[in-house]
Amino acid sequence: MQQVIQTCLRHKRIRFFNPAFFNKWTLFEWLSQSSNTRPFIPATQRLQAGSDLEKLIQQHPFVYLKPIRGKAGKGIMKVSRITDKAPFKGYELSIQEKTKSHISRYPSVSQLWSQVRGIIGSKEYIIQQGITLSTYKKRPFDLRVLVQKNARGQWSVAGVGARLAGKLSITTHVPRGGSIDDPSKLLSSSFGQNGNREDYYESKKNSDSSRQADRKSERADAG
C-alpha cells in the first residue's frame, strides 16, 4: 500500500488527498481549541515520564497508551487500576498482540512504568482517558463516521460504520481481532428506539470535528 501511495504522490497528474494519518497529539490540540468539539475529547497528554502515567491513572479507572503516529491499533496498550475489592491491589497492563492481548500486573506505578518504558523505547506516545463503550453480547463496539467534503466544499457524512471488538482484544480495530458490523443493529441493542437518534448525534459530532481539523490544518499549511 505504501508503494502505491508513493507512486501516486510522484505522479504529476494525480492529485492525492490526505497522504498520511494525522499526528494524534496535533489532532488533540486542534480539537481541544474549539468549544464545539472540546467537550467530546477525552483527557489526553503526552507520555514522557512515569509521573504522566501516575497522574492520569489516578483520575480515571483505565487509560490507553497510544503511539502518536500509530495506525490500525498497532502499539496500543491499556492500563487499569485494580479495584480494592480484588485480592491483588495495583495496576493491570494489557498489551495488544494481533488478535489477543497479553496481561500482566504490577503493585506500583514505578514498576509498571519500567515495563512500559522498555516497550515504547524512543517512540512518541500519548496517554488518554479510557471511555467505557457500549457492548453487544459483552463485546465493546464503536462507530466510525466517514465525513467528506462535497462538490460545494461543505462537510457531509458519507457513511457510518460500526466495529465490534474481538473477544480478547482491547480495541475494535479489525487487524487486532475486531469485526465490521451493522450500526443500526448494535445501536438498537443498546439504546432501543433511540438508536437512530444516537446515530445522528454521532454524525453531527464528527462533522464538527472534521470542520475544526480542516480549519486548523489550513492555518498550519499557510504558516
Image: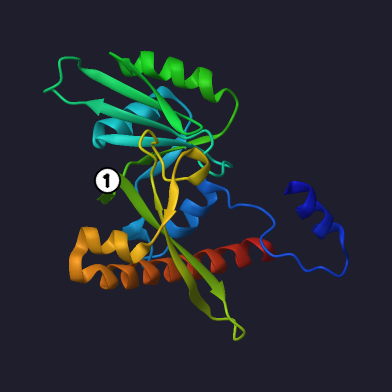
Point 30% across, 15% down: residue? 108
Point 59% across, 42% down: residue? 69
Q: Residue furthest left?
A: 85
- Where residue 74 sits in the image (x, y, percent)? 54, 36
Can residue 223 be seen? no
- Is the C terminus in the top left, top right, bottom left or bottom right quadrant? bottom right
Point 25% across, 27% down: residue? 81
Q: Is residue 83 left or right of residue 1?
A: left
Residue 204's image quarter? bottom left
- Where residue 109 sits in the image (x, y, percent)? 33, 19
Compared with residue 95, is residue 167 higher up or lower down, i.e. above or below? below
Compared with residue 95, is residue 5 higher up or lower down, i.e. above or below? below
Between 156 and 137, the one nearer to me in the picture: 137
Between 65 and 197, the one nearer to me in the picture: 197
Q: Is residue 73 left or right of residue 140?
A: right
Number of on-image labels:
1
Can residue 2 be seen? yes
The residue singled out by tag 1 in the image is 132
Q: Is residue 195 left or right of residue 120?
A: left
- Where residue 2 sits in the image (x, y, percent)? 74, 47
Disc 1, SS: loop
**Three-letter code for the amino acid on which mark 1 is drawn:** Thr
